[in-house]
Image: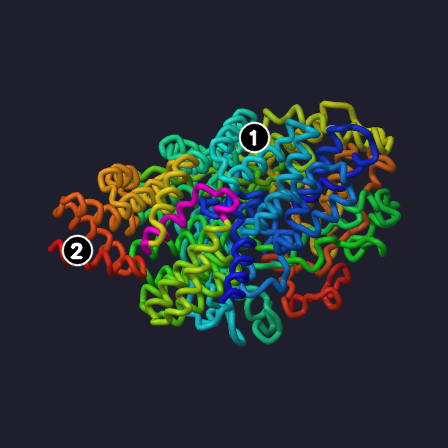
């Protein structure tokens, strides 16, 4: 085994004082560790690294491995208490060694999870100077710049990443950019390359399957999207975004019973407001008003909890409110504040939609122009843009935009697709 | 209703730590790249009866496979180009003269189940192999700049990957029904195999990881152990790789196809009698911004990993340079000579810790093997019959083993490497304890095969368990 052999040779370093020998021996031990644990579940990783940290608390690398496993757990569970635990460990390591590279990389990832995008971009830039050949840092730089809406520089960073090392992590970002830049055909191809490249973490591959499903669903390939979500569930059972995807696929075929069942499973795994909003729509469509009301209540409570915690920005809830004509002033507040944190096309779309619902059509059109700067094939973007154009009296433009939304996917949303259809009818 | 609200309140409070309630796109970042990581490279003249004029090359990927890791098991990556590079001229300068590429394609057959394989499979063409992989071989001659694409065997059968060994119910008589039938003879005389196998690498990794808790008498093995060529594992030693599978890509090539003059060499003094081989993995670059070119047809390939000799990257290349080394070409290996010619653990560990007397730098004995880092094969050395092979290869007079005759599955590269680094190939250093170093594991957990592809059948998922599996006990579970 190529990776392992040195062990015999390097391990004696533990017995002596040479720092470089220690470092090398440690590194190899950890390479083997990673290989040997590659098929483990994240919880098993965590408990194993916890044992290692306990046994050798003086080894920062084990602390970093544990922090990395905690971050992975956040990805899988959306339980942000793990992020705090990761953050404590990383701060501790950096506190003792400001130049600990591995911890510094994790710190960037943590700041991304916290939506501290500017800080994440700064950290990443520093790390690209420390180690310009490490694709990871170009990846986190691209991630931060994307959220901030600096797509051009983000594309440069991602290009460096993929040219240094084509793999699941760089391919999935390239695929995403192809979609943003209105190239869904190649977005699909490249996302399939990401899936084929794979990862020792099952969730990582499942994540890419879900992203593929989203691309397919947005462009109307409903059956193939269902296959992608199913593949994700095979990879990583009970994966909530894949369950939600299955629900969207069922809803696109008006199969409310299956849609509700899948979305309830997703909600049970991770109760995101988006899932409650989807369930509200499904229950309404199925004529189950009482159940629908419960989901509406849940969304309001979620927002109340957010408000109590002084949450000012949340474009997801902004969209939900605007979609349903609930609390439109709050929708606008949440969307406007989101723009202070990030400036990507999705934030501009949420703002445009909230502005439209608040009848500020001119400002809505300005925001929508930014959202559609790359003609991203998001059916809801075109739908929003169509209604905004219509409100400004631009009938021809409105027709084209609404047509485009429905061409991409005639069932792009349980409620909004029929509104789009109705509006198009009225314009014709 | 109130209780409902309270319940949902709790739910919401738990789920939506408010700062993070709005999503962002958090694409995964990889710590390890499992599908493109190469484990071992084996290159040797065939010792199968009647095949001594063929050279066998095999590479193993995706180490530490749990035989029972269903339902999808392990597969080759469709996004990786797996390559054997052959250098047969210019005194072996590390530039390829010929390349044999393997490109895999996965077909998902109609599947009513949640598993990738189902039912009592009757053979390699059974439709119950839902996850069906095939491969294309591309032989590139870099001197003439020609490429030959091979899609089927000589009978027109697709080049298919052997399915995993699930167990006696699904894959009965594995080797007869699935292993050997997955060896394909090509129209050009080559034979190929791709699929799961037992990991032929053996090493007491567990004892070593436990902070050098070597199981006595390791790490200094008395000379009596060296005469034992198989099954000679010390009773206390444990093969940490026992019971695990790897994915193997193997090719058997007529020697005259590999030499620059198209002959089977007989004179070792002739430069053309020697070739060098290394394996590499590659993936395609795609452009992030849309371009008129199809990303799959037009992307340039970049090297992700490479392997020549065992030991190199781990033992000789400093860690911060590892990624750079993996991306670079053997022809540029002179830049690493400063590290390879003066390995710190020879002086720092063997000498510093164990007090062994080791040769002074520069270690020309190591530079000759590792710069450039290609597996050298003297094609005039005849293969040693299986019964006469010695795990210590040239160190025990069996020149057909590593590092002179390439590397065979039987070669104990840990012990050979340890001793070579202690300088036993340098005059005056082939003395005890330098020539007695070892980990105590002297053979593979299950018997190797004496026919292509030589690695033992993969351990069966059903038979693999802590109680009944091999796990160092030497019980074959691959049938």
Circle 2 is placed at which residue position? A424
The stretch of residues the image draws in magenta is A306-325
Q: Is residue A229 left or right of residue A40?
A: left
Residue A247's image quarter? Answer: bottom left
Determine if residue B155 is in view: no
Q: Is residue A333 left or right of residue A405?
A: right
Looking at the rendering, in which quadrant would you find the C terminus of chain B?
bottom right
Q: Chain of mark 2?
A: A
Q: Is residue A173 left or right of residue B361?
A: left
Q: What residue appears at the point 62 percent right and 47 percent down from the top-left corner?
A: A69
Q: What residue appears at the point 37 percent right and 69 percent down from the top-left corner?
A: A289
| Position in image of residue B363 (x %, y %) | 72, 26
Depth check: give the residue in front, A382 or B160: A382
Circle 1 is placed at which residue position? B91
Q: CA distance from mark 2 to mark 1?
A: 74 Å
Secondary structure that dominates the magenta span? helix
Q: Residues within 10 Å of mark 2 (few under 14, many from 20)?
A: many
| Position in image of residue A19 (x %, y %) | 76, 28
């Amino acid at each position: 085994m190529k990776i392992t052999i040195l062990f015999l040779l390097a391990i004696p370093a533990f017995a002596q004082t040479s720092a470089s020998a220690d470092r090398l021996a440690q590194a190899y031990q950890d390479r083997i560790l990673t290989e040997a644990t590659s098929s483990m579940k994240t919880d098993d990783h965590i408990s194993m690294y916890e044992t290692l940290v306990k046994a050798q608390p003086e080894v920062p690398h084990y602390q970093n491995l544990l922090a990395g496993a905690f971050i992975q757990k956040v990805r899988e569970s959306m339980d942000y208490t793990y992020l705090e635990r990761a953050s404590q460990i990383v701060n501790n390591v950096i506190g003792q060694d400001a130049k600990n590279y591995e911890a510094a990389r994790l710190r960037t990832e943590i700041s991304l999870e916290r939506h501290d995008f500017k800080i994440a971009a700064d950290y990443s830039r520093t790390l690209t100077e420390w180690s310009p050949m490490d694709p990871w840092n170009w990846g986190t730089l691209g991630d931060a710049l994307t959220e901030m809406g600096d797509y051009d520089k983000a594309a440069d960073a991602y290009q460096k990443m993929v040219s240094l090392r084509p793999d699941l992590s760089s391919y999935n970002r390239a695929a995403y950019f192809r979609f943003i830049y209105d190239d869904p055909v190649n977005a699909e191809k490249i996302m399939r390359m990401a899936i084929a490249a794979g990862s020792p973490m099952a969730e990582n591959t499942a994540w890419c399957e879900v992203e593929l499903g989203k691309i397919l669903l947005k462009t109307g390939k409903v059956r193939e999207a269902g296959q992608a979500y199913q593949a994700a569930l095979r990879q990583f059972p009970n994966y909530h975004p894949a369950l939600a995807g299955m629900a969207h696929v069922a809803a696109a075929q008006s199969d409310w019973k299956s849609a509700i069942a899948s979305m309830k499973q997703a909600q049970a795994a991770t109760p995101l407001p988006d899932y409650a909003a989807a369930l509200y729509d499904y229950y309404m469509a199925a004529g189950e008003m009482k159940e629908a009301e419960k989901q509406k209540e849940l969304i309001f409570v979620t927002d109340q909890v957010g408000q109590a915690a002084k949450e000012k920005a949340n474009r997801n809830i902004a969209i939900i409110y605007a979609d349903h004509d609930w609390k439109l002033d709050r929708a606008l507040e949440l969307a406007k504040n989101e723009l202070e944190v990030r400036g990507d096309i999705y934030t501009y779309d949420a703002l445009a939609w909230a502005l439209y619902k608040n009848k500020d059509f001119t400002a809505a059109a300005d925001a929508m122009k930014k959202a559609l700067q790359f003609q991203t094939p998001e059916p809801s973007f075109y739908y929003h843009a169509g209604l905004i154009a219509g409100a400004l009296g631009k009938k021809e433009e409105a027709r084209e935009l609404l047509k485009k939304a429905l061409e991409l996917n005639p069932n792009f949303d349980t409620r909004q697709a029929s509104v789009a259809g109705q509006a198009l009818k009225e314009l014709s | 209703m109130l209780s409902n609200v309270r319940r949902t309140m709790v739910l919401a409070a738990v789920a939506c730590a408010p700062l993070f309630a709005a999503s962002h796109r958090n694409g995964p970042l990889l710590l390890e790249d499992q599908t493109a990581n190469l484990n071992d490279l084996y290159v040797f003249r065939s010792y199968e009866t009647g095949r001594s004029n063929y050279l066998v090359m095999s590479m193993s990927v995706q180490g530490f496979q749990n035989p029972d890791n269903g339902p999808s098991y392990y597969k080759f990556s469709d996004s990786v180009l797996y390559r054997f590079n052959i250098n047969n001229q210019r005194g072996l300068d590390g530039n390829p003269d010929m390349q044999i590429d393997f490109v895999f394609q996965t077909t998902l057959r109609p599947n009513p189940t949640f598993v990738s394989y189902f039912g009592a499979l009757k053979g390699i063409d059974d439709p119950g192999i839902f996850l069906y992989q095939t491969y294309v071989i591309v032989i590139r001659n870099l001197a003439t700049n020609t490429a030959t694409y091979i899609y089927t065997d000589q009978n027109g059968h697709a080049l298919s990957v052997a399915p995993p060994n699930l167990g006696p119910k699904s894959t009965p008589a594995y080797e007869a029904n699935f292993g050997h039938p997955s060896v394909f003879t090509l129209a050009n005389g080559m034979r190929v195999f791709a699929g799961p196998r037992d990991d032929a690498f053996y090493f007491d990794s567990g004892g070593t990881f436990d902070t050098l808790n070597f199981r006595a008498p390791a790490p200094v093995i008395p000379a009596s152990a060296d005469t034992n060529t198989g099954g000679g594992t010390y009773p206390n030693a444990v093969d940490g790789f026992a019971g695990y599978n790897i994915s193997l890509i193997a090719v058997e090539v007529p020697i005259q196809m590999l030499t620059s003059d198209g002959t089977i060499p007989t004179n070792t003094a002739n430069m053309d009698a020697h070739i060098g081989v290394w394996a590499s993995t590659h993936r395609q670059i795609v452009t992030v911004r849309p371009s008129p070119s199809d990303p799959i047809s037009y992307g340039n390939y970049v090297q992700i990993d490479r392997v020549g000799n065992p030991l190199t990257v781990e033992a000789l290349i400093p860690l911060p340079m590892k990624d750079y080394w993996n991306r670079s070409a053997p022809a540029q290996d002179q830049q690493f000579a400063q590290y390879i010619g003066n390995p710190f653990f020879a002086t720092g560990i063997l000498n510093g810790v164990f007090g062994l007397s080791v040769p002074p730098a520069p270690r020309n004995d190591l530079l000759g093997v590792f710069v450039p880092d290609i597996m050298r094969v003297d094609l005039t050395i005849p293969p040693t019959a299986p019964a006469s092979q010695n795990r210590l290869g040239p160190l025990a007079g069996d020149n057909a083993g590593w590092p002179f005759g390439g590397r065979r599955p039987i070669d104990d590269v840990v012990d050979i490497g340890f001793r070579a680094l202690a300088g036993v190939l340098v005059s005056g250093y082939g003395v005890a304890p330098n020539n007695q170093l070892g980990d105590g594991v002297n053979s593979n957990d299950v018997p190797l095969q004496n026919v292509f592809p030589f690695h033992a059948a993969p351990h069966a998922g059903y038979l693999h368990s802590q109680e009944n599996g091999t796990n160092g006990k030497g019980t074959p579970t691959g049938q």
